[in-house]
Image: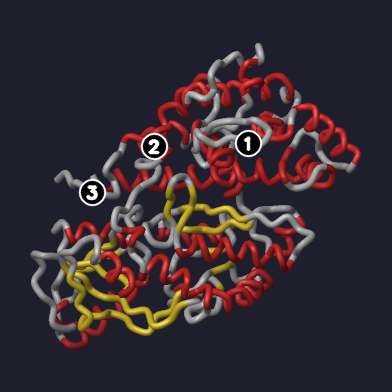
């Protein structure tokens, strides 16, 4: 059965990303490489703090190329909190999207450091990970039906009903506990169906609103907001399968210092705090942003430019998501942007640079020419100046040269060697020489491109699988 979905209106751009998912060593693989150290080890190793998220339309989603959502805002403020706490350290944060039921395995495997996904604290989860103090309390897990679903008066009415839930969610755990009670009472058990692991609760609410399934379970605040989008949803509060729930962030059990700092920060964003109320109002009370939910990888400036990014990335042998990430860092996809130094357009390239014989692209005020010139110049930098560096670091150096100029980066490689660092590696080596000599602009530039790329890459993987699951 083919559905008309607001969220998955245009499949082409996400499916286009498949070609990027099996690229050679990249930022996404580097970021998610196993590491289980605590916060001091992360800081000493100059590692980004990796936040494991689950792509949905409330807590983590992409909008016009940027990560957005309630958990995103909270973690970005945690990043600011850390920068104030450790002013002499380079603090970085990277979002790593994975399916919801892979959040805790990814955390325990060392593929991420914090789970920030609106996760309900349960005893089963407590046995595996360490939770921060709750930042939201009194969560109610509610059964929700659609227009054609028979009404539910109380919990007993759930006996024998089929209910779809997000895989790995606390809903699944609590319904199984309810079935134990039903068995003792001689009632038929609930037929609990764990949805495809690539689907999230918002997807299931859309499905029940469309009549594809009869019942689902969702947190009460999610139901209240998404009722305004899917008007055929009917929550049955008398059939709440769990009340008094709490939401918290999770870390590995041994990460005592990271947990301590998270708990210190938690006081600034918990429910009832000024900042916490602001976030909650933005994403759960003020619903203007959600009335036309968009997948910005499909419906945004990025969508309109995706063909051009792919065209020239392929021509000059780059991953097009890396080029998109660079463009977002340069201009937020704004072709009308012009810098004080005279750089213009999406790729923020100077007309004089584009006119150089090594690039030779005219009229960069036109979008396609601007992207062409920027990518061709990046290729020139990579091939002319960095053939002697480690293969998987060449793009890192090319990005640094794009920002600071190749001569300056050559000098920084020499400085890195003098400092006992590897001049053929950017991250953790030449970037620290750059930080020491010219300040944070170029290290931050390269790091941001890599962070955006990792987020785009992870999101592409999750969304591609989700589209396949919903077809």
Q: Residues within 10 Å of mark 1 (few under 14, many from 20)?
A: few
Mark 2 lies on residue? 303
Residue under the image location 75 percent in, 46 percent down: 428
Residues at marks 2 and 1, CA–CA distance in whole angstroms: 24 Å
**Residue 392 seen in this snapshot:** no
Q: Which residue is mark 1?
A: 339
Q: Between residues 210 and 277, which one lies in front from this camera angle? A: 277
Q: Is residue 14 above or below residue 389?
A: below
Taking the spot 53% from the left edge, 73% from the top edge, the residue there is 275
Quadrant of residue 161 in the image?
bottom left
Label 3, on which residue?
5
Q: Is residue 345 above or below residue 168?
A: above
Q: Earlier in the sequence, mark 1 or mark 3?
A: 3
User: Which is closer to the viewer, label 2 or label 3?
Assistant: 2
Q: Nearer the viewer, mark 1 or mark 3?
A: 1
In the displayed structure image, the side of residue 342 where residue 230 appears, left or right:
left
Residue 187 drawn at (x, y percent):
14, 82
Tell me: residue 440, above or below residue 301: below
Looking at the rendering, in which quadrant would you find the N terminus? Answer: top left
Q: Quadrant of the C terminus?
A: top left
Q: Nearer the viewer, mark 2 or mark 1?
A: 1
Identified at 33% across, 64% down, the residue is 287
Please tell me which residue is depicted at 46% across the width and 37% down the height of the picture.
21
Q: Residues under labels 1 and 3: Cα distance?
A: 40 Å
In which image quadrant can residue 133 be found? Answer: bottom right
Q: Secondary structure at mark 2?
A: helix
Q: Earlier in the sequence, mark 2 or mark 1?
A: 2
* Residue 145 appears in view: yes
What percent of the width, then of the height, locates residue 463?
A: 37, 46
Q: CA distance from mark 2 to mark 3?
A: 17 Å
The answer to whether the residues at label 2 and label 1 have Cβ atoms under 8 Å apart is no
């Amino acid at each position: 059965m083919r559905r008309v979905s607001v969220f998955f209106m245009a499949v082409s751009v996400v499916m286009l990303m498949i070609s990027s998912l099996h690229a050679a060593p990249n930022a996404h693989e580097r970021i998610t490489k196993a590491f289980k150290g605590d916060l001091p080890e992360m800081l000493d190793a100059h590692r980004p703090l990796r936040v494991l998220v689950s792509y949905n339309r409330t807590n983590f989603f992409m909008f016009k190329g940027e990560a957005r959502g309630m958990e995103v805002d909270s973690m970005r403020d945690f990043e600011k909190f850390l920068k104030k706490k450790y002013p002499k350290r380079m603090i970085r944060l990277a979002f790593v999207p994975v399916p919801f039921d892979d959040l805790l395995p990814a955390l325990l495997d060392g593929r991420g450091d914090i789970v920030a996904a609106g996760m309900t604290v349960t005893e089963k989860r407590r046995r595996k990970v360490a939770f921060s103090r709750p930042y939201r309390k009194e969560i109610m897990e509610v059964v929700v039906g659609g227009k054609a679903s028979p009404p539910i008066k109380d919990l007993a009415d759930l006996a024998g009903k089929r209910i779809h839930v997000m895989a790995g969610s606390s809903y699944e755990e609590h319904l199984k506990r309810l079935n134990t009670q039903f068995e003792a009472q001689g009632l038929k058990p609930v037929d609990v169906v764990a949805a495809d692991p690539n689907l999230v609760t918002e997807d299931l609410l859309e499905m029940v609103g469309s009549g594809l399934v009869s019942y689902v379970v969702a947190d009460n605040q999610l139901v209240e907001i998404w009722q305004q989008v899917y008007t055929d949803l009917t929550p049955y509060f008398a059939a709440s399968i769990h009340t008094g729930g709490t939401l918290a962030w999770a870390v590995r059990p041994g990460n005592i210092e990271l947990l301590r700092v998270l708990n210190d920060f938690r006081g600034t964003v918990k429910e009832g705090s000024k900042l916490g109320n602001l976030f909650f109002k933005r994403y759960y009370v003020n619903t203007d942003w959600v009335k036309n939910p968009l997948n910005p990888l499909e419906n945004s400036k990025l969508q309109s430019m995706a063909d051009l990014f792919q065209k020239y990335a392929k021509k000059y042998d780059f991953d097009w998501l890396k080029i998109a990430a660079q463009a977002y860092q340069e201009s937020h996809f704004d072709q009308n942007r012009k810098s004080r130094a005279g750089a213009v357009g999406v790729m923020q390239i100077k007309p004089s640079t584009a006119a150089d014989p090594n690039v030779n692209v005219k009229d960069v005020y036109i979008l396609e020419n601007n992207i062409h010139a920027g990518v061709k110049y990046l290729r020139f930098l990579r091939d002319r100046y960095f053939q002697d560096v480690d293969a998987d670091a060449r793009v890192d150096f090319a990005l640094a040269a794009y920002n600071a100029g190749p001569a300056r980066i050559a000098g920084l490689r020499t400085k890195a060697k003098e400092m006992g660092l590897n001049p053929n590696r950017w991250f953790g080596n030449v970037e620290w020489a750059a930080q020491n000599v010219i300040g944070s602009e170029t290290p931050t530039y390269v790091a941001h491109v890599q962070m955006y790329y990792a987020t785009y890459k992870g999101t592409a993987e999750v969304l591609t699988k989700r589209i396949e699951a919903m077809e």
